[in-house]
Image (cartoon, coloured by chain):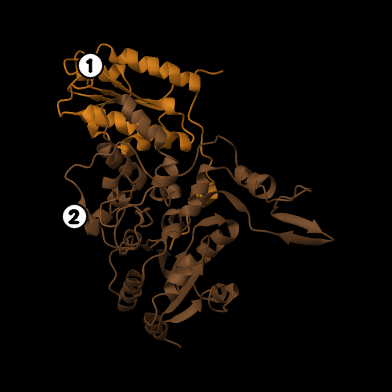
Chain colours: A orange, B brown
Amino acid sequence: MKHYEPKLVCFSCKFGWGYLADEEEMRTRIKNWVPIICSGKIDAIHILEAFKQGADGVLILGCPEGDCHYQDGNFEARKKVLLLKKVLEAYGIEKERLRIELSMDPEGRTIPDIVKQMSDALAKLGPVRKVKERARAMTTARR
Amino acid sequence: MAGKPKVAICWLGGCGGCDEAVVDINEAILRVVEAVDIVLWPVALDFKYDHVERMEDGAIALSVINGNVRNADQEEMAKLLRHKSQLVLAFGACACFGGTPGLANLRTKKDIFDWVYRDAPTVVNPEKNYPLVKVSSNGTVLTLPEFYEQVYPLNQIIDVDYYLPGCPPPPDLIVNAFTAVLEGKLPPRGSTLAPHKALCDTCERNKTKPNRIAIRDVKRIHEVEAQTNTCFLAQGILCMGPATRTGCGETCININIPCRGCFGPVEGVKDAGAKYISALASIIDAEDEKDVRQFVDKLNDEVGYLYRFSVPSSILRKRRTGEAEEL
């Protein structure tokens, strides 16, 4: 089997993760890293769009439970993730491809490890199964 | 007849309810018929497709197309009307978003054929006959339109100028749409001819909503006797109102049935189901992860509920199966 590197998108909350790290340097180590302010800000649409754009997995790093700067944004994110897993499965995307981790690491040293760990799990799953759309249907009749 | 704008009304993958909705505008239809020259309406009038084929491109002022596209015949008809029409109106939830038949995008064509022609308990098919696109019998070649691997909303097949959602669209919006076309008072192309707000904005029951809704589990409408004057969500009954465009006249709410989402997402939103997930997450009353899991486990057919009318136009469109199409 040829080497396959899964495409992982990692959202992380700036209040808990990597805020002391050099963002530029972190970016060189983590592909598709999206630091945000509060994991609760992530909408279900962002996650579905990531899969639509070809992501093999989405990882969300939020603050520890009970420790959200905005009271419970991280818990809201967890609720969305649990609701979304069922939707993803119905669309043929394994639920393991969406993960949320509530913890913290201001220096962000562990982020590359967590990303690698999930990437390895995704590599075992293989790429997301494809939708084979007809080329003909995609060329719509124009006025 | 000459000089009147030509109008075509056509059904593709729909149930006929949208055609009936046009008739349901009652006496207003007399004004419409007076003002236009109907050149095609398969469900009501005896015009032939080749009448349309013989017309010049752009000869039809407006084509009102309901239903989705699932087979080659529907695709051909949609493309023919597009070429012959100045304006195309996607009429009803199936044309706009795929509609309930679009739920079939969560299955493969093979699943559907196996069930319909082999496995369903009422099927007797000892010779294992499946529909074929082409078959020869006694020297005669018979053909059927090809059944596609998935359901398409109209705008994935042809350019659509205007959208009028609903299952079916309500009479007042139909009359408004026809009037706007006849008077040339149309909004920019691509607009949906319905209000921009969410159903909750116009729902009478909104007043009864507590400041914070918190629900511990979900009840389905047939499992409880729903109160007739209280917000469904406050009663723990899933109502698609927060993520659905208003304009339907709250016909379901008025007969004590929660919104099912036939008007599609509100203005500017692509995926109503995803928006609903964000709304629903915020009202789940849970202390910890275990509570949330319990809540989610009890949700029966979550996708069917959240995307009842909109799987083919949702962000993910179709189940990923990895299986090659036989096209």
Label 2: how many Cα within 10 Å (few below 14, some 14–19, many 20+): few
* Alpha carbons under labels 2 and 1: distance apart: 41 Å
Q: Quadrant of residue A107?
A: top left
Q: Residue at point 50% right, 53% down?
A: B101
Q: Residue at point 56% right, 75% down?
A: B54
- Spot occupied by residue A97 in the image (x, y as percentages of width and height): 41, 26
Label 1: how many Cα within 10 Å (few below 14, some 14–19, many 20+): many
Q: Residue at point 18% right, 25% down?
A: A68
Label 1 sits on residue: A104
* Above or below, comparing residue B158 to residue B176 in the picture: above
Left or right of A93 in this view: A77: left
Q: Nearer the viewer, residue B13 or B8?
A: B13
Q: Nearer the viewer, residue B289 or B178?
A: B289
Dot 2 falls on a residue whose secondary structure is helix
Camera sees residue B96: yes
Label 2 sits on residue: B207
Q: Are marks 2 and 1 in contact (CB under 8 Å)?
A: no
Left or right of B148 in this view: B273: left
* Above or below, comparing residue A58 to residue B135 in the picture: above
Disc 2 with disc 1 on a shared chain: no
Q: Nearer the viewer, residue B297 or B88?
A: B297
Left or right of A75 in this view: B117: right
Instruction: Give the amino acid at mark 2.
Output: Lys
Q: Chain of mark 2?
A: B
Instruction: Give the amino acid at mark 1.
Output: Met
Q: Quadrant of residue B2?
A: bottom left
Q: Residue at point 40% right, 35% down?
A: B298
Q: Chain of mark 1?
A: A
> Residue B63 — which label?
none
* Above or below, comparing residue B203 to residue B312 in the picture: below
- Spot occupied by residue A41 in the image (x, y as percentages of width and height): 23, 34
Dot 1 falls on a residue whose secondary structure is loop
